[in-house]
Each structure stands twice: as C-alpha cells, then as structure tokens.
C-alpha cells in the first residue's frame, strides 16, 4: 500500500484538528489580511530605526531600509504564490511548517520551521509584554517620580490584561483589534516624528553628529547588527497563518493585503527613521522615547505629546502580543481541542483558558526576569527572521515553480538567498557579540530595560 506524502499526511491532520478549525478559521477578506499583516510588521520596533541608522549612516541606512522593504514584499508575494499553487493542486496549507515540509519533502524541515517560528513568536510575546510594562512605567514615573512600583509590577499588570484578551478564540476575531492597531501605529508615528522635529530644533537639542565608529572592525560589527535589527523590524514569520484566515481563494486577496500593509510601512518607517536619526544622530537610543526623555535633563518634547504616544504604543502592544501568540495557541489546541464539539463547549473552553493563561504567564515571567530587549532584537532578526523571510520563501518558490537556472527569477532568488544567508550569519555573530559585551549591565528582574 502506498504511503501518503508529507503534504497529504499534514492535510488529513489539519482537516480534523481543532487548531485549524478554531484558531485558524478561514473567513476573512483581503482588508482583514491587511490589518493582520500591518499589526505583525508595523509595531513599536520602528522606534528602533534611528538606532539602526546609527550603525549605518545616512546613505547606507536609507539603502538598507529600502532594500529590505523591496525584498520582503517580494518574498511575501512569492510565499503567497507558493501557497496558492499548493492549494490549486489540492494541498491547501495553513501553517508555515506544513508548507515547508511539503514543498521540500523533508521531515526535518518541518521541525526546523517549528523551532524557528516558535522562538520568534515567543520572543515577540515576551517583548510585547516587556515594552508594554515599560510604557506603563514611563507614565507612572511622570505622574509619581518617587513612587514605589517597579518595572516587574507593571509587567504583571500587562500580563493580567493579556490573559483576558488571549481568550479571543480565533485569529479572525482579532480583525477589529488589528484595525485599531493600524491607526495606532499611524498615530504614534506622527506624534514621535513631530516630537523629534521639535527636539532637533530646540535650544536644548543635542549636538548632531552622524559619524560612524572610527575603528573599521567595530564599524563593520555595528553595521551587521543594524542590518539584523532592520530585518527583524520588517520580519513576519506568520504569513501562511495570516493567509489561512482568508476565505479561499486567497492569492489575489493576499496581494491587496500586502499592498495595504506596505503603504503603512512607507508612511511610518521612513518618517520615524529619518526624523529620529536627524534629531539625535549617533546618540539615538534603541528606543527613541529614551532619547526624547533623557534620564538627566528636561524632556525634549511636550510631555502631553509623549504621553499620548506612549499610550498608543501601549495599546498596540496588546494587539501585537495577541497576533504572534496565535501560532502557539494553534499548536496547543491541535492537541487539546476536540473539533467534534463546539468552540465554546466546556470540553474546549476549559483547556483553552488554562493553556493560554499558562503561556501568557510564562511570557510575562520571562519579560520580568530578562529585560534585555535591545540586544535580543538583533539576535532574533539574524537567527529567526532572516531564514524565514529572506531565504525560505525564495527556496520554496524555486522548488515549486522550478524556473530555469538561467532565468532572471532564478538568479534573483538565488542571489537574495546567498546574500541574506551571509548577512544572517554575520548579523548573528555581531548581535551575540554585542549581547556578550553588554552582559555586565544585565540584571535579573531589573527595573530598567537594557538597550
């Protein structure tokens, strides 16, 4: 008797498991995909862009930002086409790991993607809680400078809210939250750009210095770390899962969703990067808020502007944490749920509440224990996002459509894979190097987020 292929085996599983039926319901329209994609990519990490420019300078910074935008749009478009091709062949995939295993015909690739994707999603879940806690701390310290509450107290508060929100049962049910997230990203970007322009023109503005590090080796390491940070900012390790939320057929809808997302990216990424780097140069912090609110000296922008921006960031972080938790919830409910009973039946509701609460509590605990967001951001970009977003989609497309090796498409895809594999290796090395060098500043359950 013939054995089923990997794709067929995965398809049979997905048709009956609760993770697919409940969490990844396929009911959305193209604008819903646009909301999800925007929340997955356009987040408070854009406030790190001036810091990334610090290691690249003006010309290389603009070039890398533009190149990453073009390559990621192209990459996500290719992945959407591969998903559509498999669907037309009767093998509809709703999970990244299933797609990679089917196209590449390899069981180890299935587990490789699971490992990388889980690391990214957990890292973003932890980072969202950590930064939300930091936002609350900033608001609290502005109201009560000598208050007794610490960072871990605010992280605990955020975790409780996330536990409640995590009970929204499906990815599709986040569509209205993610629409709000889109407007929030536009709102705090506009406020931060205005604040940076105000700061750069004020009498207390720091001296503008755009020079790079004098030592060539240090300059090279900083450049690769910056490239890794930009890669992580553009990264989206859950595109197949987002496409799965669309009512079939999804390919044309996904292109429209990507166009919506990248229109928002164009408005926010460039304005945040240029205004922040113009205002602070090589003194830019890994969170531009810290540059606008220095520990010593007065605020460089109106307090009410920064307060509203922080509130917008805080609210959007809840949406980001929810979006990137969906893969974990889908994995858990594939094993714990019973598709033959209702989504809100006691049989499915009780395990959902328990497992999602435990997952969120663990993310909150790690956020409180390891508040080292800046350096970890670069490591995640190099080790996680670069393989999933800059290498695998090109490989999957070449394996699926088999363009001639002399064709322009094949050469472009291969070039992107080679260049970004090298960049990922160097970025991982330089990011880990910086993490080690900054280790002396790390303190478990510290009260400050280490840059």
Image (cartoon, rainbow, N blue to C red):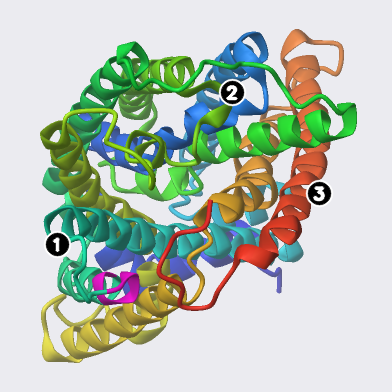
Which part of the image, by quadrant, shows the N terminus? bottom right
Q: Are marks 1 and 2 in contact (CB under 8 Å)?
A: no
Mark 3 residue crowding within 10 angstroms, few (<14) / some (14–19) / many (20+): some
In this rendering, the answer to whether 140 lies above or below 228 is below
In this rendering, the answer to whether 166 lies above or below 392 is below
Which-is-in-front pick, marks 1 and 2? 1
Q: What is the spatial separation of the Cα atoms under label 2 and label 3, in whole angstroms?
A: 20 Å
Residue on which the image places disc 2 = 68
Q: Quadrant of residue 290?
A: top left
Which-is-in-front pick, marks 2 and 3? 3
Q: Which mark is residue 70?
A: none
Q: Answer with left or right where residue 223 lies relative to residue 299.
A: right
Magenta stretch, overall SS: helix
Which comes before the other along the chain, label 2 or label 3? Answer: 2
Q: Which mark is residue 144?
A: 1
The magenta segment: 150-154
Q: Secondary structure at mark 1?
A: loop
Residue 337 location, x and y as percent?
30, 82
Q: What is the spatial separation of the Cα atoms under label 1 and label 2, in whole angstroms?
A: 42 Å
Q: Nearer the viewer, residue 334 or 231?
A: 231
Residue lying at 73% horizontally and 49% vertically, measured from the top left: 104
Residue on which the image places disc 3 = 429
Res. 105 in view: no
Q: Quadrant of residue 167?
A: bottom left
Q: Answer with left or right where residue 72 lies relative to residue 124.
A: right
Q: Secondary structure at mark 2?
A: helix
In this rendering, the answer to whether 354 lies above or below 1 is below
Q: Nearer the viewer, residue 111 or 40?
A: 40
Residue lying at 25% horizontally and 82% vertically, measured from the top left: 352
Which comes before the other along the chain, label 1 or label 2? Answer: 2
Q: Answer with left or right where residue 355 lies relative to residue 9.
A: left
């Amino acid at each position: 008797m013939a054995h089923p292929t990997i794709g067929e085996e995965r398809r049979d599983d997905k048709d009956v498991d609760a993770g697919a039926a409940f969490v990844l319901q396929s009911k959305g329209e193209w604008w819903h995909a646009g909301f999800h994609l925007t929340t997955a990519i356009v987040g408070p990490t854009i406030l790190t862009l001036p810091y990334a420019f610090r290691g690249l300078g003006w010309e290389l910074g603009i070039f890398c930002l533009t190149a990453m935008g073009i390559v990621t749009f192209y990459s996500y478009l290719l992945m959407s086409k591969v998903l559509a091709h498999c669907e037309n062949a009767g093998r509809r995939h709703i999970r990244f790991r299933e797609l990679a295993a089917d196209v590449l015909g390899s069981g180890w690739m299935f587990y490789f993607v699971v490992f990388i994707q889980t690391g990214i999603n957990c890292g973003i879940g932890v980072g969202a809680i950590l930064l939300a806690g930091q936002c609350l701390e900033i608001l609290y310290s502005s109201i009560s400078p000598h208050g007794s509450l610490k960072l871990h107290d605010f992280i605990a508060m955020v975790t409780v809210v996330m536990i409640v929100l995590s009970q929204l049962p499906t990815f599709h049910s986040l569509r209205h939250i993610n629409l709000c997230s889109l407007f929030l990203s536009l709102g705090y970007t506009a406020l931060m750009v205005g604040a940076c322009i105000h700061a750069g023109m004020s009498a207390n503005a720091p001296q503008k210095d755009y020079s790079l590090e004098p030592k060539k080796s240090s300059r090279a390491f900083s450049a690769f770390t910056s490239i890794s940070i930009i890669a992580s900012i553009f990264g989206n390790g859950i595109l197949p899962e987002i496409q799965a939320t669309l009512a079939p057929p999804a390919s044309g809808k996904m292109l429209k969703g990507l166009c919506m997302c990248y229109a928002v990216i164009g408005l926010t990424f460039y304005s945040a990067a240029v205004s922040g780097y113009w205002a602070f140069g090589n003194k830019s912090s890994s969170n531009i808020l810290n540059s606008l609110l220095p520990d010593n000296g007065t605020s460089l922008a109106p307090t009410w502007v920064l307060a509203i921006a922080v509130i917008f960031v805080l609210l959007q972080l809840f949406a980001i944490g929810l979006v990137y938790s969906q893969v974990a919830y889908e994995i858990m409910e594939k094993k714990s749920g019973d598709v033959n009973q209702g989504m809100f039946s006691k049989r499915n509701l009780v395990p959902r509440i328990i497992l999602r609460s435990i997952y969120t509590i663990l993310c909150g605990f790690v956020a409180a224990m390891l508040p080292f967001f800046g350096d970890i951001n670069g490591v995640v970009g190099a080790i996680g996002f670069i393989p999933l977003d800059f290498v695998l989609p090109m490989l999957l497309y070449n394996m699926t459509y088999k363009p001639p090796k002399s064709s322009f498409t094949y050469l472009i895809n291969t070039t992107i894979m080679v260049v970004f594999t090298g960049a990922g290796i160097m970025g991982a090395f330089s990011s880990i190097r910086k993490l080690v060098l900054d280790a002396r500043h790390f303190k478990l359950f510290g009260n400050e987020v280490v840059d």
